[in-house]
Image (cartoon, helix red, strand yellow):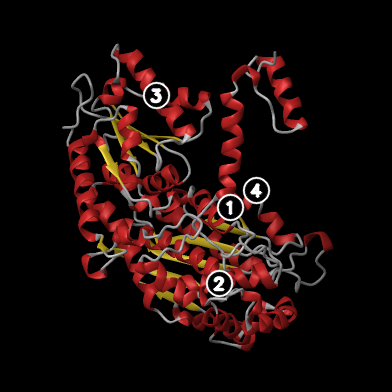
Amino acid sequence: MTHSSISPDTLPAWQTLNGLAERGKQLDLMSLFRQDADRQRRFALSVDGLLLDYSKNLIDEGIFSALLALAEQSALEQQRDSLFKGDTINGSEQRAALHTALRGEREDDYRCGEQLLDEQIRATLDEMAAISASVRAGKWLGATGKPVRDIVHIGIGGSVLGPQLACQALRPYSHPDLRLHFMANVDGEDILNTLRQLDPERTLVIVASKTFTTQETLLNTRTTLHWLEQQLGQSELAGSRQIIALTANRQNAEAFGIPPSQILTFDEWVGGRYSVWSCVGLTISISLGHERFKELLRGARAMDRHFRSAPFAQNMPVILALLGIWYRNFLDASSIAIIPYCQRLSLLPSYLQQLDMESNGKSVSQSGATLDYQTGPVLWGQTGTNAQHTFFQLFHQSNHLIPLDFIAAAGEPRSIDEHHRTLLANLLAQASALMKGNHDQPDIPAHRVCPGNKPSNLLLLDDLTPYHLGQLLALYEHKVFVQGAIWNINSYDQWGVELGKEIASSLLSQGDNSEAPDPSTQQLLNHISGLTGLFRRP
């Protein structure tokens, strides 16, 4: 067994943590604070305007030391070096995972093999800057000569989630005259609803697809172009100035009819769920201005440098990852909740769902062996205070162990002081109530008892700026990487996604003679065909 394929359950620290699990389940958070007046300071870490308070977790010094030992004994350090060196860490696809290079600087010396990457990355950023400046200045004209006003970003998964999240999270910085629209789902009603909002003479279509073969993205693009052609009385708009392609497959984009000068490319070593840092971020650059897109990159780079250099005991992504492993593998927590107390971060749970569950939803090791320990948890969430009135009841009074990540911006100059004070008061109150409960109150009826002792982290940004958003997203990227490295899984492939695509393609390619892969699906096909004729049988 090579060092890079160490099974974590064979490590001494894993056995130690197994022995500590029962103690962890018996820990009382309020007692831990009473016993250690310095706990809230020792179990906290600040990195350049981003504070992590992890003092409300079911850990003590012994458990935390054992978790750090697990990181030290695992292949994490070697895997981290391999990630930044551009080694082939995605074994099933024989690729590097060099998305960190997209936000690097020349001094970082990123390479893929022997090839220095800085020059080509700078060239792509320059292309993005030129397009962004042209659109923002009203100089990018549609087919009839009018300046662009509506930007339609078409993609799915990582090709849309990152840009949509960033544009919403940073909307106070957006261009006042540009309207953004995002298309992902193949649902035709939703597409038509979006199209009705557009001015066809002033619409720029930006298509993001790594392979330029993605079924939903290409269908949505064809439908959009067809609608524009009908509205404008023109044809072959795929070859006009009203469309730009962002892809790793230039040949397929050109075959679609898009002019070579309107195709921006990124490399195969950029995974879809990490592509927001590439030219796929063009929509962000157009909306916010390119300098602010570069601020997003700078924030992510700052977290890269912290992750790469900080000792594990003071390393924010490592600490978050180890806490997650403690809950998943030793305290049997099957899910985690992401609760941003910031409406601009309402898409963050969806973004992190793909980042985490698509990366670490695996059950075989790097070498293909079936795992006998759990890996990625179910991730879910919603913004506060909305979530308090939907599912927080379950947090407070159920028997489920669900660790939470609370996220907020301490400062929000674009809000109203009374509103922001109320928002943060609710955040602090919920974290406190989950930990403290009310079981110590005398004569309280059983149905009102909240037992407390529910763990949470608090991530507090100084302000939600492009820089701090970059930090936050990179933090979670590296957290997911650390967990995958310790679990000895490949966090950079997603073969489970492909199976459903293959079956859908088979059903669609057969047309009226669609034959299902199983009796249940066949019965459902027959039922749909009887109602709509969409899958008619002979």
Secondary structure of residue under mark 2:
helix
Looking at the picture, does residue 185 appear above or below residue 345?
above
Q: Nearer the viewer, mark 3 or mark 1?
A: 3
Going by the numbered disc 4, the residue's amino acid type is: Thr
Q: Is residue 460 left or right of residue 100?
A: right
Secondary structure of residue under mark 1:
strand
- At 64% from the left edge and 49% from the top edge, which residue is drawn? 389
Q: Nearer the viewer, mark 2 or mark 3?
A: 2
Q: Is residue 394 left or right of residue 1?
A: right
Query: Disc 1 or 4, which lies upstream in sequence?
Result: 1
Q: Position of residue 303 (x, y in %)?
A: 37, 68
Q: Nearer the viewer, mark 4 or mark 2?
A: 2
Q: Are marks 4 and 3 in contact (CB under 8 Å)?
A: no
Provide the residue designation for mark 1.
381
Going by the numbered disc 3, the residue's amino acid type is: Thr
Secondary structure of residue under mark 4:
loop
Going by the numbered disc 2, the residue's amino acid type is: Ser
- Mark 1 to mark 4 CA distance (whole Å): 11 Å
Looking at the picture, does residue 411 appear above or below residue 317?
above
- Mark 1 to mark 2 CA distance (whole Å): 33 Å
Going by the numbered disc 1, the residue's amino acid type is: Gly
Provide the residue designation for mark 2.
5
Q: Are marks 2 and 3 in contact (CB under 8 Å)?
A: no
Q: Is residue 353 left or right of residue 524?
A: left
Query: Disc 2 or 3, which lies upstream in sequence?
Result: 2
- At 34% from the left edge and 71% from the top edge, which residue is drawn? 305
Query: Disc 4 or 2, which lies upstream in sequence?
Result: 2
Provide the residue designation for mark 3.
224
